Amino acid sequence: MSGIGSHNDMDPLNSILYEWHSVPGEHFTYRKGDTVNDYDVNKAKRIIKESPRAIEFVSVSSLKDDSEETKIQKTKDKDVKLHIPIIMITMSSGEQMCIDGYHRIRKAIRINENGEHKISKLPAVILSKKETEEILKVKNVTTKEANRRPY
């Protein structure tokens, strides 16, 4: 993948190589049925800064369904940097989900669909189940309750 910087198989990429810019109040809300979970993305970035980890590579095709269901603000493709890792959480079930990086995922999908070239994987940092619990601000509230919360 281009844009990652120089690296070889003997020198694995690590999250310490990236700046993890925080945006005040940045969070990710996951809704499934009547259940809503809200994750603190700023806290996730602090955890990554404090506990660097290897960069993993996640299949773009495995992220497509979640990307299509997620509402995000519009941004220009030129401002979206594919070399910056997405942030994924590990839920109690062991399932992993992206909480930061949907602009990057959608850009990769568009590039693949346009046939410009293929981007099969994106860099990612993955939080453990314990770290995921630490960034969970609101857990299992109903959609009705969530709509009343001042995130």
Image (spheres, rainbow, N blue to C red):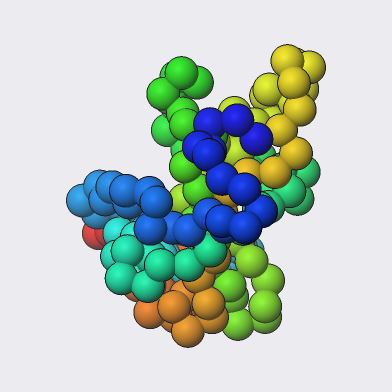
Residue 143 in the image: above or below residue 73? below
Give the x, y percent position of residue 112.
75, 26
Name the residue rendered at 37%, 72% in the picture. 51
For residue 17, side relative to residue 21 (left or right): right
* Residue ranking furthest to the left: 24
- The quadrant in which residue 25 appears is bottom left
As drawn, 119 above or below 99: above
Residue 137's spot in the image, x, y percent?
35, 72
Residue 14 point in image, percent of width and height: 48, 58
Q: Position of residue 15 (x, y in %)?
A: 44, 58
Viewer can see residue 79: yes
Q: Quadrant of residue 92?
A: bottom right
Q: Residue at x 42, y 33 (%)?
A: 73
Is 112 displayed left or right of 12 in the figure? right
Residue farthest front in this picture = 10
Q: Quadrant of residue 144?
A: bottom left
Quadrant occupied by the C terminus: bottom left
User: At 50% across and 37% down in the image, what residue appears?
Assistant: 5
